[in-house]
Image (spheres, helix red, strand yellow):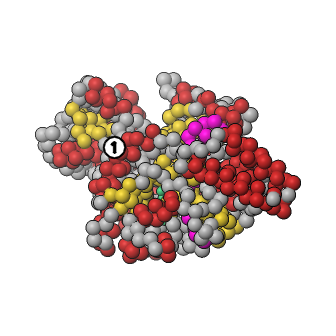
Amino acid sequence: MIQDRIKKLTDILNKANYNYHVLDKPTITDQEYDKYLRELINLEEENPEFKDKNSPTTRIGGEVIDEFNKVTHEIPMLSLSNVFNEEEIRKFDERIKREVKDPKYVCELKIDGLSISLLYKDGKLVRGATRGDGVVGEDITTNAKTIKTIPLEIIEKRNIEIRGEIYMSKETFNELNEEKKKNKEELFANPRNAAAGSVRQLDSKIAAKRKLDCFLYHLPNAEEYGINTHYEALEYIKKLGLIVNPNIKKVDNIDGVLNYIEYWANNRNTLPYEIDGIVIKLDSLKDQKRMGYTAKYPKWATAYKFPATLVLTKLKDIIFTVGRTGQVTPNAILEPVILMGSTISKATLHNEDYVKALGLKIGDIVAIKKAGDVIPEVVSVESDRRDGTEKEFIMAQNCPICGSRLIRKEDESAYYCHNPHCDAKRIESLIHYTDRPAMNINGFGDSIIEDFYNMGYLKNFKDFYKLKEHKKELMELEGFGEKSINNLLEEIELSKQNSLEKLLFALGIRHVGSKTAKILSKKYKNLKNLMSVSYEELVDVKDIGEVIAKSLTDYFQEEKNINLINELEKQGLNFNYLGKQEIYNELISGKKFVLTGTLNTITREEAKSRIEDLGGETRESVSKAIDVVIVGTNPGSKYDKAVKLNIEIWNEDEFLKAL
Ligand code: IVH
């Protein structure tokens, strides 16, 4: 009987597939597999009435659809909250402990792919769906069936939904991009994008070729199957014939979680697929219920995200922006990527020389780095991934805002717009004035300043102090009420009391950064004193060079600046240095420090300012002149250099103790 033969072949092929892909223990050779498969394809072609919807021949794809149908997830597919450091992990544990005594956790790798829901009816795969917005996803059943690690039938003939992650191995990803390069096609930026793109192929034959894989990690309503813990749920998923990641670990407490994280942070490169963190789940299902959910996340689980110092993405374009000094900077417009928990779609390219030194072309795949609070940067280009469609970079010759011809100064890489009336420059300098290290006027977002500028309320620094005269009009603007305007005006009033170094930095005098402003304020105590200091005297001040001295004396000679300062004085701004008396700290005062890696309990900016407050100095690079290198998690090459030069090294705890 043909039907019997079809059944027999189906069993052989399904079993062979399971042994090979799930158990990793092949029982028949590839040639035998192909022979049986061909026989089954032929039989089905000759007798289409006997073809089963879940025949192993669906693995090779074939069905082409116009669009994906929408599916509703009866139980929403939630995402996970994120934590980024030990402190946040411990806080997560504390929240759990408020409800649960002695919680046990299951640690899992956070697979960098896309989540999928698999629905089995009477043991047969009837639906594969993407997460979509959590409630409505897309029906990708035909493509799911091409994934060999997803069984078309499970061991028990029951109705069950199982969720997990579809991913592409690093090897498959590299092969795929190699092939795309050969065919001069656009390359995928990373394995996750490649997996997502493959799952959403309308032609399932193409999806089948992409060699996707799947790990399952979640059984909604597990209690209904007599299961009490998440760990048992994973065991059960395995028993049904699906793949659970082998690196799961049940731990007794949060220290066990931290050890697991440390291990995988150091060993993730050994895995054949990408992970972007660790998932921590409360083991007891009863306790999970007790913790419950927010609208978006389960409260019984969280994801620790690795500090992804480098990610690859596509450089879509290079645009030019004008800063407060008139410097025109090229900026990278990127295909959005998540880096350290935030989505990055822009990065600075500094100047023309930087772009040229990197050899960037528009359309390249580039590596992006973000360290601590620092602005994301493009650090390298994957030039071997070019496909010939990339475009050369050409530096702007005119200001993108006012159109004036840009000028590149000798000895500088930067191009400047010299039009003093250029709107972009003026808006940027107003934004700078309110910044935290400058006058620290809270409540002004960049767009408010831009709006106030365009409406004529803010053209100059002194106008901040005249805003109160327009209170009524401002309150009537869309998006502002009495309360927000009052808050803004209060902030402006408060800022008048700032110590001199903040005002001096806020004025935006070229080459006078916050550090220089502090040195000068400390030395001259009052703005009026500083204004009368000669160039010769300034160059003699420690850490003040010719460039700064010239810039300052030029600034204070210009009539419009003198008028501005007089106006600010009239408005009641404090011109005195109010600096705290420096406290002597044996371990810090007078020493030079370099920071590397991520500090968990303090931002890098704060750390620097604490060191400076205690009379220490901070530097960016390690040399023999450095006394101490402070090392956070995932330190860079500065750490290696410090070891090499035998420089004293402190970890975060030691630094905090010293403080
Ligand atoms: S559990 C209610 N476990 O990470 C349970 N998710 O950032 C929700 N992911 O949407 C998911 N590996 O796509 C879970 N071992 C793992 C995971 C994992 C990767 C993904 C998943 C989720 C996203 C949240």
Question: Is residue 307 in view from this perspective?
Answer: yes
Q: Is residue 172 magenta?
A: yes
342 w.r.t. 404: above or below:
below
Q: Quadrant of the N terminus?
A: bottom right
Residue 358 spot, x, y in % from top left:
55, 29
The residue range painted magenta reads 159-176
At x 61% / y 55%, what residue is drawn?
150
At x 61% / y 40%, what residue is drawn?
172
Q: Is residue 641 left or right of residue 382?
A: left
In the rendered image, which quarter is residue 106 located in? bottom left
378 w.r.t. 304: above or below:
above
Between 415 and 329, the residue placed more toward the observer is: 329
Extreme residue toward the front, this view: 1
Residue 259 spot, x, y in % from top left:
31, 50
Check disc 1 and report the residue beneath it: 633
Between 247 and 459, the residue placed more toward the observer is: 247
Query: What amino acid is found at the position of numbered circle 1 in the picture?
Result: Thr
At x 87% / y 54%, what residue is drawn?
46
Q: Is residue 253 magenta?
A: no
Q: How would you rate the neighbour count of disc 1 (Cα within 10 Å): few for under 14, some for 14-19, many for 20 or more?
A: some
Question: Is residue 135 in view from this perspective?
Answer: no
628 w.r.t. 198: above or below:
above
Residue 8 spot, x, y in % from top left:
71, 55
Residue 113 spot, x, y in % from top left:
56, 52
Tell me the element at label 1: loop
